[in-house]
Every structure is written in structure tokens, then in C-alpha cells.
Image (cartoon, rainbow, N blue to C red):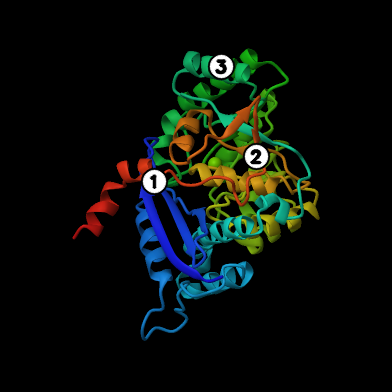
Amino acid sequence: MKIKDLRVYLTKPGVGRTWVFVEIETDNGIVGVGESTNAGGGGALIVGRAYELLKNDITGADFSDGLVGQDPEHIDRIWHQVYRRFGTLGSRGLATTLCSGIDMALWDIKGKALDRPVYNLLGGPLRDRVHLYSHVAPADNIAECVADAKRQVRLGYTALKLDPFAPEMAKKHRRYIDGKISAQAEEHADNLMTELRKAVGPNIELMIDAHGNFDLPTATRLCNRMLKHNLTWFEEPLQPEGNEALRQLKSNTDMPLCIGERKYTRWDFLPILEQGLVNYIMPDICWTGGITEMRKIAILAETYYVPVTPHDASGAFNVITGAHTMMTVPNFYRLEMSDHSVKAYNSVITKPLDIRDGYLHLSDRPGLGYDLNHDFIKANPDPEWERSHSR
Ligand SMILES: [Mg+2]
């Protein structure tokens, strides 16, 4: 079997971000699907262009062997080839995002070729369904947010996340400047969490995502102030670069911490685990290197008895590939998704996700079990991507 073609699709599913999908076709007609959706700043356009570069050899450039003509069953070899190719640009982020989509598509091809679901090729299922957690909104309206939480609990979700600081901090979302929050916004967050806890009761898990917006004294104060809400975790209290700041925060709060959507590969997670900096890790399967790397990170975390809880801010194949991987991971906590995005997830695939009672149920269809809905993608392109390709 040889790789015959690589195609990249940038689509606007109607929930804000552009989703990036990749298809790899083999010479015997099997098509594998992967996702490399990126988060903002035009990242989707860079990833799309880089995929086009990966397809064929680049004449006169070293380390530039194209994917066409390679054996799609050599998943690890191709992963390392892509990962090392852009080492001087930075192997974390861009390279691992490219690895992610290719890796997913190659696992899909292998499963389809062998007529087995991907989770069966990863060691087989440890569980028969995948526990989810969802998002509640809007954070700027306590009554509506509480109503949304109650609605989702009725649907069967038992863990809910939000950024209660977002009404003020969303303007600087992940764009850290001074790391401060006003007293009023902090008070609003506290009141919102009080009302949510009151509404859902003690048995529903609640998590806060702070999107890395705070400096060390602010993060320490907020973690300690939120302790009374009995949270499962406080996510990304700090920006992702400084492990020492995380160590200082950890030693000054009893709040359980979770980080990892902006950590890439096993090498980034090792010091976090070695130093015991967090209670949960949340690698993003579209950013950290796909199914192969997610599994390696999960195994590393298993040796520290730290639960893995894959991050999702992307499209359907983030959720689907995360679910396949977590079917086989003992130290799995929950898979992130948003009930508000289910319609968008289903719009880009040809069969709907089977979500019942807060769980995602995978089928025994071969490969990943889902294909791209080309009619939807064609009808909803990223306008900038389309414009740059019509010149
Ligand atoms: Mg987050």
C-alpha cells in the first residue's frame, strides 16, 4: 500500500473557529481522515499551507521528502519524519499539529485495511464507552448559565466546565498582559460558581478554565478563593511557559490543578509529572501529535498515577480520535467536548456521534468509524483559504 494523495480542508462550521481536516488516500482506494484544527490567529491558514508542502518532495530542499509514495502503515516512521522536519522552526506546535492530522489519518487507514476499529489496534478496549464532560454558558449571565447547567444535567452530563472570569478576561483570552482581574469580575466569578454549585448539587463535578490569564499572586488568590466550590480542577491558572511558577502555585494552594492543552509531546509532560506540578493532564490530540503521541503521554502519566483528560477546542475528529485512544487508556478521567457544539460536530461527519447519558459510544466500524461530510465542507469553506486558492 502506498500514499497516493493528501488533501486538506478548511471549513467554518458556524461555531467560530475554522476547522482543519486532512484526508490521506492510498493507491488501493482507502481514505483516512485526521484533524489539525488550530486555535485563532490565522493558525489554520498556516497549517493548511504546511500540509500542502508535505504532500510532495520539494525540489532542491533537504529533509523535504513528500508523503506521496510512502507506506501508510509506517505510522511511527512518518510521525518522526514530520516531527523532525521543522525542528529549527520549532517542533512543538506547528510540527506536532501536522503530525496529529497525519497520524490520525494513518491509523484510520490501518484500521480500514485490517477491518478493525482503531481502539482494537491500540491494545483493545478497557471500557465500552467514553465518559465526557461538557461546557456551560454564558458566563456573563448567572441565571442563563444556571439554566444551561440544569439542562445539561438533565441530558446526563455529570461534569461541567466554564471560565467564570471570561466576562472580563475574554478580551485578553490567552493573550496574557498583566495577569490581573478586577475585584468586580472576581466577585462575579465567585457568585456564578456559588449559584452553579447550588443548582447542580454536590454530586455534579464542576471545573474552572482560567485560560492562562493570571499572574502568580492572582492565580494563587483565585485558586484559594474558589476552594469552597469543591471543584474537580482549576485549569491553566498560569501561562504555559513557566513550570517554576506552577510549582510555587501548587505549594500555596490545595486546589487541584490541570494543564496541558499547550504542552506538546511526551517531552513537555515529563517535567510536569516528575515534579508533581498538577493533578490532571489534558493534552490536545490535534496539537500534541495525534493518537500515537497521546497514547505515549498517557502511558507516561500512568506511571505517576495521574489521570489523562484530553482537551477539545476543535472539531469532530478531535473528539472521535480522543475517544478511540481513551478506550484503551487505564488512567483516563473524561473526554472534553461541548454539548453546544454537537450540532457542528455532526455537520462535518456522515454519521452522527452516539452521545447518550454523558457518554460517547464508539461503534465497531473499521478505522475511526467516521468519514468527512464533503457536501457540508464544500458549502462552508473558510473564506480566506478559498480566496487565497482562487488567485
Ligand atoms: Mg482550556
- Precedes in sequence: disc 1 or disc 3: 3
- Residue 272 in view (yes/no): no
Mark seen at residue 151: 3
Mark toward the start of the polypeptide (2 vs 3): 3
The residue that mark 1 highlights is 374
Local crowd at mark 1 within 10 Å, few (<14), some, or many (≥20)?
A: some
**Image quadrant containing the N terminus:** bottom right
Element under label 3? helix
| Horizontal arrangement in the rendering, residue 55 relative to residue 83 (left or right) | left
**The image quadrant in which ligand 1 is located:** top right
- Is the CB of the residue bearing disc 2 within 8 angstroms of ligand 1? no
Q: Which residue is mark 2?
A: 362
Left or right: residue 95 versus residue 207 is: left
> Which tag is nearer the camera, tag 2 or tag 3?
2
| Dot 3 beta carbon under 8 Å from ligand 1 | no
Residue 339 against residue 42 in the figure, above or below: above
Whole-percent x and y of residue 293? 64, 59
Q: Which residue is drawn at the image coordinates 29% and 53% (left, top)?
A: 385
Camera-nearest residue between 303 and 238: 303
**What is the residue that sits farthest to the left in this orientation?**
391
